[in-house]
Amino acid sequence: MTESFEKTKIAGSIAAGALDEVNNIIKPGVSTSEIDKFCYEYINDHKAFSAPLYYRGYPKSCCTSSNHVVCHGIPSEKILNDGDILNVDVTAIKDGWHGDTSRMFVVGECSVKAKKLIKTTYEAMMEAIKIIKANIKIGNIGYTIQKIVEAEGFSVVRDFCGHGIGKKFHESPNVLHYGEKNSGQELKAGMIFTVEPMINYGKFETKTLKDGWTAVTKDKSLSAQFEHTVGVTKEGYEIFTLSDKGLNFPPKL
Ligand code: MF3
Ligand code: CO
Ligand code: CO
């Protein structure tokens, strides 16, 4: 394994490990700032840094995006309620390398429609990751996601995309979660990037709130997201942010 893969895997395991623990603290009555505090401490305890903290002025250690929040929800004193769906996005920096991952969590019991959205989002991400290998076109990732998502009547967010990652948090290439088959650049062995589709129950348009970060669906419909950091190999791919505990997908669903 190359240094970049080894180091990204270590950072990715810390981020994934934080989410494994977050799974135990999410319940009705918990605030998103409690989740943030937990992530901050978990990352610190693993002698790593939180990449979001102070990144372009971002004030917290993770993103907590509930219900119609698409991404970049800022942890606050807001309390989680039964039936809420929540994405927690954690990025750890260990030894200079980044590992970025997010998952959906369900607070108590959610609606059947929320479950279907979450399942479809996860399936779309995983099916897109499975096609990754050297020499395919990057557009096939977005094509795969869009096909699965639109077949269920949901929509793919255009305003945010996956990204190259390494010693920098965000770098090239942009990984679009929609698009045409065989479009875009060719994947090369050794590339590392995220696949992190944001999928809306309704229309794909988003808007950003006055805090400058929180992105919400324009039509107020529910939104879901999962994210893995992935490396390209000659034969396929390696996921650097898998759960050791089998918690990649919410166990309750
Ligand atoms: N983790 C997010 C991503 O997947 C980025 C968050 S940037 C922040 O790329 F500043 F909002 F934390
Ligand atoms: Co990311
Ligand atoms: Co992320």
Image (cartoon, rainbow, N blue to C red):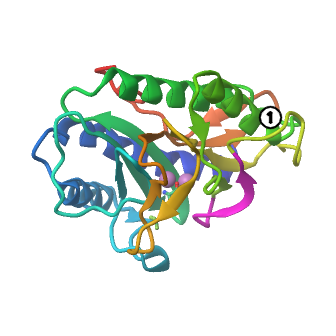
Question: Quick one: SS at disc 1?
Answer: helix
In x, y percent, where is residue 211? Answer: 38, 74
In x, y percent, where is residue 77? Answer: 16, 62
Q: Quadrant of the C terminus?
A: top left
Residue lying furthest bottom: 57
Q: Residues within 10 Å of mark 1 (few under 14, many from 20)?
A: many
Q: Nearer the viewer, residue 56 or 169?
A: 56
The quarter of the image that holds ligand 2 is: bottom right
Q: In which image quadrant can residue 142 be found?
A: top right
Q: Quadrant of the N terminus?
A: top right
Q: In which image quadrant can residue 139 be found?
A: top right
Q: Is residue 233 visible?
A: no
Q: Nearer the viewer, residue 66 or 194?
A: 66
Q: Nearer the viewer, residue 200 or 175?
A: 200
| Left or right of 42, for residue 214 | right
Task: Give the residue at x 45% y 42%.
Answer: 223
In x, y percent, where is residue 248? Answer: 42, 30
- The stretch drawn in magenta includes residue 168: yes
- The stretch drawn in magenta includes residue 136: no
| Left or right of 135, for residue 230 | left
In x, y percent, where is residue 98? Answer: 53, 58
Which residue is tagged 1?
140
Task: Give the residue at x 52% y 31%.
Answer: 121
Q: Is residue 194 above or below residue 251?
A: below
| Left or right of 118, for residue 19 | left
Count the marks: 1
Task: Give the residue at x 87% y 47%.
Answer: 184
| Left or right of 74, for residue 228 | right
Task: Give the residue at x 26% y 58%.
Answer: 36
Q: Which residues, given as a range, are shown in magenta?
A: 166-176
Residue lying furthest front: 219
Q: Amino acid at mark 1?
A: Asn
